[in-house]
Structures are given as C-alpha cells and as structure tokens.
Amino acid sequence: MAAAWGRAKRALATKLCIRVPTRQNDLEEDAYSPPARWEPCLLSPPAAASDTVAARDSVTEEKAWSPSLSLRRLSSSGSRSSNSKRVCAICLGGMRTSHGQALFTAECSHKFHFHCITSNVRHGNHICPICRAEWKELPFQGTQPADATHGRARVSPVNWPHDDGHMTVVRRLSHTYSGNLQEQFPVFRAPEVHIFNDDEHIDLQPGTMDGSNAVTGSVEIKTYSEFQAIQQSVTQKVFSILIRLKAPKSLDSVNSRAPLDLVTVLDVSGSMKGAKLALLKSAMSFVIQTLGPNDRLSVIAFSSTPRRLFPLRRMTITGQMRALQAVNSLVDGGGTNIADGLKMGAKVIEQRRLKNPVCSIILLSDGQDTYSLPSYDGVQQNHSVLVPPSILPGTGNHVQIHTFGFGADHDSAAMHSIAETSSGTFSFIDAEGSIQNGFAQCIGGLLSVVVKDMQLGIECVDEGVLLTSIKSGSYTSQVAEDDRNGSVDIGDLYADEERAFLVTLQVPAAQGPTVLIKPSCTYQDAVTAENIQVHGEEVSVQRPAYFVDCKMCPEVEREWHRVQAMEDMSAARAAAEGGAFSQAVSILEGRTRILESQAAHSSDSQCLALITELREMQERVESQRRYDESGRAYMLAGLSSHSWQRATARGDSTELNTQIHTYQTPSMVDMLHRSQALVPSVVAMLNRSPTVAPSRSSSQPIRPTKSFSERLP
C-alpha cells in the first residue's frame, strides 16, 4: 500500500490537494510551534489520516509539557537550509499538511504561504526572497497574474476548509488560457482566525481578592499658591496654583494587587537577527516569569505578517512554561508590518470574553513600517493611522500602548505617535543589552496600578475668580465656557505615583481673603472596583491693604521650570526637524543656563536632573548625523516622559541616564534592580555564545538564571 501511495504521490507531483483541518486550534497554535514540529508539505495516505492526527496530537501534548524534549529536537532539526524548506521565509510560519495554509510554489521551486507572498508582491517585490530569482509569473489574489503564459508557479491550498471535506485537485493553468481567471478558479485566501475569544478563564473577580487592605489610604491632594497674599486693590491677571496628586501605596503581594492583561507585540523581522533577537527572548523570559498566576499574557510576533503565538493565558507555572516555549521558538526574517501587528493585538483586547482590571499593550520594533505608510516625500506623515481605532481613548476597549524603539534604525516618530495617540509612553532603547531593563521598568509600573479612570476637577469659588489655563502636558484638559470650572482626564496611576498640574487664574480686586478654587478628584480603586471621590481643601489668598513683598512658592517655581523646559525641548526638536541644528542647541543652552542659575542657590534634584537631560540633548542635536542616529529618539522619549509625568527608558540605561528618571516609582525601581542584576550575566553569555553571531539568526532559547527564578513568588 505504501509503495502504491508513493507512486501516486509522484504522479501527482505537479498538482495540489486540499483537506479539511481536524481541529480548529490546529490552524493557529500548531502553525507557530517551535521548529522541531515543522514538517514538509507532503501528502499522507487518506486511510491513515486519523492516525496521523492522533499521533500529532500526542506529540503536541508531549512537547508542551517537556521543554527539554523540544529543545533537543530543536537543536537536532538540521541545518538552516533544511529548515527553509519547512517554513515560509516571509512569516516564518510552518508549512505542513493539516494546517489550513495555502501554499505557493514559485518557478524557482521555493515555497511560501500564499497570503504572505501576495502581500510581498503587492508592495513591489517581484523576486524570490530566498534565491533572488526574478519571477515571470506572479502569485495573484483576485486578479490575473502579470504573465499567465508560463504556468510554472502554482498555488497549493493544503487542507482548505471546504464543506464537502473531500480531496480536491487544482490543475496548473493552461499555456493557452486567456479568459477571466476568477470565473474558472476560486480565489484562494489564507485562512485567518477572526475571533479571539479564546482567552483563559479568570477565577478572581473585582473585590474578591485577598486585598481588602491592598491599598493603604486614598489619593492625596495638595495645593500650593504662587504667593500667599495679593494687594486688595490689584487685579491679578495671572496667578498660579500648583495641584499635586499622589496615588496611595499598595502592599507588595501578588494576591493584593490588580491583575493584568498584557499583550506584547514584538518585531521579529530580518533586522532583529543575532544578539537582538536573543536579548529580546531574554527580556520576554523576564516578563513571563515576573507575571503572577492571576495575570494573563498573549504574544504577537510580526514581520511581513503578524501571528499570535498563543491567546491570553494565565501565567501559572504551566502557562509560563508554554509561553517560554513559544517565545523561544521565534526566528527572525521578513519585513516590518507594525500596523497589522497592532491590529492583531487590538483584536485580542477587543474580543476577550473576560477582562482583568488592568490592561496594556507593549510594542517593540527596530525598523520602519514598510507596509502601511507611504515613503517620505517631505510631508509630515500621519503615524496615528497605525493605531487601531477600536482601542483609542473614548472607546470601551481603550488601552495604553507603551512603545519601545530599538536601535538607530527604528522609526521614532511613528513609535512616539502611536504611544501619544493611545495615552502610552515611548521609550528609546539605544544599547542592545537594555531591552530587558526597559521592559522591567514598564512592567514594574503595570503591576502596581492602584487607580483607574481618574479625573481631576477644578471649581472656582469666589465671584470674579476665573480659570484661564491648565498646564496638563499630554493629558486632556478643558476649561468651561464660563471659565469657572475645569477638568483633567488622568486615567491610571501606579502606586506612589504623582501628578502635578499648574493652573492659572485671574483674581479680581477684593477686600478680605479671597477663596480661589476647590479641587477634587474621582477614580476607581483598581483592586476593589470601588468608585471613590476625594475633595481637596479650598485654596485662598490674603488681601492686605498695602503691598507685601512675598517670595514665590518654591514648589510652584520648580514646576514652572519643568513646564518651560519641556516647551523648550519641543521647540528645539522642531528646529532640528527643520535642519536648524545650531538653533536647537541654542534653545537648549538657554534653558540650561536658567536652570543652572536656579540650581546655584538650591540643591533641587529635579532641577539638576533637567540640567543633565538638556546637556545630553545638546550633544545629540549637534549635527544631522547625530540627530538621526539617536537625537530624535532621545528627545521624543524625554518629551513623552515629561508630558505624561511617567518614567521612560532613554538611551542605554547608564548611570547618566538613570539620573534623569525623576518619575520612577518604588515598584519600578525595584523591578529595574531585579533586571539589572541579571543583565550582565545574560550579555556575557551572549558574547561567548556562537549562536548570536551577526551572520546567523538566533533561534536558541534564553533561559532565566536560577537565582531569579528562586526569587519569584
């Protein structure tokens, strides 16, 4: 029987087959399994189909529970050339039977997923990604190929989900065919999983955790007036008040904090080869083992096309093991399709059946989006189109996207725009060894959220007092038409995190003390889901009959320096974008001198940090080369940090750069220290390992060190 079937296969070598997938999950999870499970796309005898599926299922379970077995088979899976026959060189997904993947075999004999190669061709790539041979016949998707007279390329829709479930043969095009292709043949499209409602069940509901005392206290509201007194006969056109909010502390326990739904969208394009990919795996290993059993994680990997490695899965011991296996299976290759990666991440968020109290997306990329944006023609591009509208602020599924631009070639403007549009932060990872530290700082914050959907309200009290402006950075603020009320939408706060907002008022002439404003805030407790309202004390000012020489409040003065420094950073960036680098340096130098004079009679740490940051920016905007290499990304990361008043990674996380992180919270610092204790050993290991040589793709797994694993809860 086997010999007869072998002859049948050879007789049908120029034809293709279709077979219905046995399990729905096979279409997704197995397609992105480690390379040890990839097999060539060969036909199997129909009589043995059920046995083959059963055998494959048993192997799948065995490997899911045995990482050592997977790694042994991974290491013995053969050379890179043999693997290239088993995987699509564009998306790096497996090409094997019973996976519902349409395959395209080019005239040069190389195979690809049909939807991958049609996407490649749509963007003008008419040569083989493997051997660089120029094709005379191109794959089509709904339209006739450019040259249908050669008939050497073919589409192989393996295991297509037809209703009849029988094997269907698709013959190659006739040399003389000249009719409408769609009338004679169906339009084959790659099967996609459109519904992502397979998130793992959540046992804990809001308010039922072991956390009745998880948060100590409530949000604190403090106010500082610019001056303590105003002469009663004077109308003060601009009078400043600083409103400072501080989130409560949280207990350091995995069972007393709000659990997290995290989706990581990771660039695994060809530029991520070698040490980059190995260090990304190490960083993800840190993230996976830092998450607790109530947290859920889903990983999206994208190159030319995105793929979901696994659905939202709880990070129990078993969940962590399977997540590590999936991340360790990543290999580099293909283009950079940021938009489609984010779309898939947004689908995971939108379509989940259950929701943890905290949710976020982390996006990392080291390249330019080559699929969704037109080439730069001197006109400012609208990078916000990369963010799926369904997760923007104001929607029921809004989540923050924290972006990480990696290396000198990433599109920092696009990554910053994505973060700003979604109310997230942008971080710049300059050195390869700093990926894990950047992730650790971000995760330290996300795992300590204590306040959700916070809004600050400002109400003018005495008649004639008018609210003229709110210095809120990137936070959405508004002043009522009658100038008597205002608000700021703040969103989530981490434990011990602070926010400061300067408001300016017009104060009329008056006799006796004038009550200016009354601040308040409303928010939801992230752990108990309780709605809380906090009222601050009324702010008043004395009105003496004669002029009193009052000294400006130091807190208000310090905040004005921060706001003005941020405005100068923005102006310097605008000058640098226009090529006026000497002007950009001059703007930064001017602000540095002002701050240095302020620091001469004070030892304010925030002032000293701003001076350090401005000097670093000056060095990075001295020339076009320096600005393109790191200046633009460094400045955008700084602006993101100051506008959201939240710590971001900048540069290479050296001692110089850690001095300027004035917004770090204790939980972020603790997580960063845990990461920094591991990074030197990981980098040293990579430097000694031949698997991360620049000329090779790193597909070897990175395991966390034992000392870190022992410290996990």
Image (spheres, grey):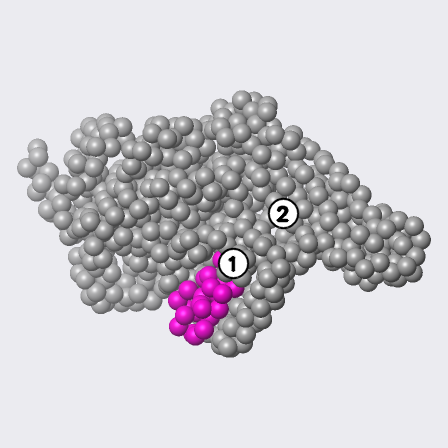
Amino acid residing under circle 2: Arg
Position of 601 with respect to 447 (left or right) is right
Query: Over which residues does the magenta segment extend?
Result: 614-640
Q: Quadrant of the N terminus?
A: top left
Name the residue rendered at 40%, 54% in the picture: 654
Q: On the image, which quarter does residue 73 sit in?
A: top left
Q: Nearer the viewer, residue 314 or 178?
A: 314
> Residue 351: x, y in percent?
49, 38
> Residue 34: x, y in percent?
25, 40
Residue that carries the numbered disc 1 in the rendered image? 638
Please say whether residue 639 is one of the residues in the magenta stretch: yes
Name the residue rendered at 20%, 44% in the picture: 41
The disc, 1 or 2, on the residue closer to the chain's N-terminal end is: 2
Q: Nearer the viewer, residue 502 or 419?
A: 502
Is residue 422 in sight in this rendering?
no
Q: Quadrant of the C terminus?
A: top left
Q: On the image, which quarter does residue 453 sit in?
A: top right
User: How many numbered circles are shown?
Assistant: 2
Q: Kindly give the residue lying farthest to the front in the view shown.
A: 601
Residue that carries the numbered disc 2 in the rendered image? 499
Q: Nearer the viewer, residue 232 or 492?
A: 232
